[in-house]
Image (tube, rainbow, N blue to C red):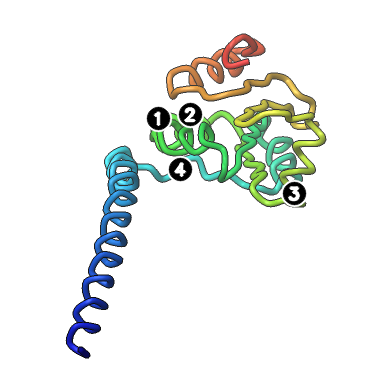
Amino acid sequence: MILNRADRGFRCGGVRAGLIVLLAGVAAMAVVPTLIRQAVSGASDTIGWTDDFDDAQSISVETGKPILLKFTADWCGPCQQMKHEVFSRERVGQFVRASFVPVVADLSLPGSDGHTLADRYAVEALPTMIVVDPGGVELSRSVGYMGSDQLLAWLARFVAGGTGDGLGG
C-alpha cells in the first residue's frame, strides 16, 4: 500500500513536473529568439543618454548642439524595439553623439524626473522624440516608432537647418 501511494504520488508529481517543463519550454521558445536577435544585432544602446536635463542644457549652451529628448518606458513595446533595433546601431550613435546632447526621459516609474519633462513638453504617447534648443524651446517632434534610416533622415534634415517635421508625427 505504501508503494502504491508513493507510485501514485510519483505519477502525479511526474505530471506536474511534465507541465512545468512544458511551460518552461514554451516560455523559452518565446524568449530565446528575442535574446538571439538582440545578441546578433548588438542590442546595447550606443548613444550614451543622460537623464539630467539641466546638465544637458548647460552642455548644449557650451557646445551649441541642440538637445535630443527621448521619452520612453520599459513597458512600451515600440520604445524597446527602437532601443534594440535603432539606438544599438553604431552609425545612429555616432550621428546623435556628434550632433546632439542626448537626454532620456524614462517614464517607467511614477514620479520620476522623466514625468516632469513629459509634462513640460506635453508628451501624450510613446515613443516621443523632441529636439529642443539650448534654452529648452521645442524645435521639432516625432511620435511613434522610427527605423534607423527614418530617424537619421529626420535628424539630418533638422541639423541641416530644417525643422525635421513630417516624419514620424
Who's the residue at 45% across and 43% down the image?
Answer: 45
Q: CA distance from mark 4 to mark 1?
A: 12 Å
Q: Which residue is mark 3?
A: 113
Give amino acid for label 3: Asp
Give residue 89's position: percent from left, percent from top: 39, 33
Q: Which residue is mark 4?
A: 45
Say whether marks 4 and 1 touch (CB < 8 Å): no
Q: Which residue is mark 1?
A: 91
Image vertical order of residue 148 relative to residue 113, above or below: above
Give residue 158's position: percent from left, percent from top: 61, 16
Give amino acid for label 1: Arg
Say whether marks 1 and 3 touch (CB < 8 Å): no
Q: CA distance from mark 4 to mark 3?
A: 21 Å
Give amino acid for label 2: Phe
Who's the residue at 41% across and 45% down the image?
Answer: 44
Give residue 32's position: percent from left, percent from top: 29, 47
Q: Residues within 10 Å of mark 3 (few under 14, many from 20)?
A: some
Q: CA distance from mark 3 to mark 2?
A: 26 Å
Query: Is tag 3's residue or tag 2's residue first in the polypeptide sequence?
Result: 2
Say whether marks 2 and 1 touch (CB < 8 Å): yes
Who's the residue at 46% across and 34% down the image?
Answer: 81
Query: Is tag 4's residue or tag 3's residue first in the polypeptide sequence?
Result: 4
Q: Is residue 33 left or right of residue 116?
A: left
Image vertical order of residue 56 relative to residue 162, above or below: below
Under tag 1, what secondary structure? helix
Name the residue nearer the viewer: 143 or 130: 143
Taking the view exactly as shown, the residue that stands out farthest to the bottom is 2
Q: Is residue 39 left or right of residue 128?
A: left
Query: Is tag 1's residue or tag 3's residue first in the polypeptide sequence?
Result: 1
Give amino acid for label 4: Asp
